[in-house]
Amino acid sequence: MKKYKHLFFDLDRTLWDFERNSTETITDLLESLDLKNKNIGNAHDFLNVYKSKNQELWLAYRQGKISKDKLRQERFHQAFLHFELNDPELALHFNDKYVEICSSKPHLLPNAKEVLRYLDEHYMMHIITNGFVEAQYVKIKNTGLENYFKQVVVSDGLGYRKPDKRIFHHAMKLAGASQKDSLMIGDDYDADIVGARAIGIDQVYFKPMHEKPKEATFEITDLKELLEFL
């Protein structure tokens, strides 16, 4: 696969273990803020509700239907309302503490560092993420990922997000890359795979273990599978 010179990685759920880091943070915050005494049930039940609300709001944000600030205000507020806790100020405080603490968590997905060490010797690597600036750079620094990536493109502040063609073109321009020598690796099918394919970039879909195959140049269920073709 010498045709590739540039590898573009997503961050959350592709390299950074979002589920583990997020779950740890929310569980600890529920305990430290004593929310079990404010109608919030156990952490497992709250996490299920929050994940559903958060996913809906992130989709709306990615589609440009709501602002970053609206997402910040609403995701925990809506989850709290499910448990009959109507306290927007508390929800906003919870959100801000969540971002601060979660982004400092160090857990990466299995085999991430081992794979990156190998790839770093053969390719120029970059990150394209739809996250927020105040969180994504902290994640990259605290996990040591900054040592492996030449360019980091964060959608926050650009005015467009994956799968918008402009973010891929922007990242390639910064990297000095072209469509034919680039490969996009990510877990979000619509944002990473469909977005990259739309501008002629090959893709690696990092899919859940039991999900049916989808259209992509390559599919993996573990990062170490990258070494089979890169």
Image (cartoon, helix red, strand yellow):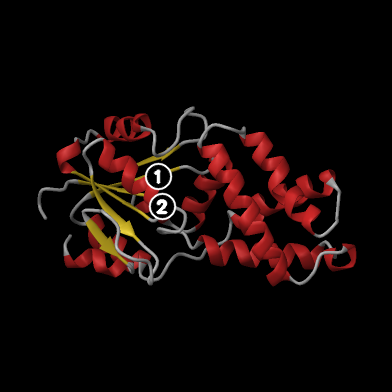
Q: Secondary structure at mark 2?
A: loop
- Residue 117 picture location, percent across and down: 29, 62
Question: Residue 121 or 42: which is nearer the viewer?
Answer: 42
Q: Tell me the kind of residue under disc 2.
A: Asp
- Residue 230 picture location, percent across and down: 17, 60
Q: Quadrant of residue 201?
A: top left
Q: Residue at x 27, y 37 (%)?
A: 198
**Residue 191's mark?**
1
* Label 2 to label 1: alpha-carbon separation: 5 Å
**Quadrant in which the N terminus appears:** bottom left
Q: Secondary structure at mark 1?
A: helix
The residue that disc 2 covers is: 188
- Residue 46 picture location, percent across and down: 72, 64
Q: Residue at x 62, y 32 (%)?
A: 67
Q: In this rendering, is residue 44 above or below 137?
A: below
Q: Is residue 99 left or right of residue 146?
A: right
Q: In this rendering, is residue 202 above or below 112?
A: above
CB contact under 8 Å: marks 2 and 1: yes
Q: Could you classify mark 1 by the number of other residues whose Cα lies within 10 Å: few (under 14), some (14-19), or many (20 or more)? A: some
Q: Is residue 149 left or right of residue 78?
A: left
Q: Tell me the kind of residue under disc 1.
A: Ala
Q: Is residue 159 visible?
A: yes
- Residue 2 picture location, percent across and down: 10, 52
Q: Could you classify mark 2 by the number of other residues whose Cα lies within 10 Å: few (under 14), some (14-19), or many (20 or more)? A: some
Q: Is residue 150 visible?
A: no
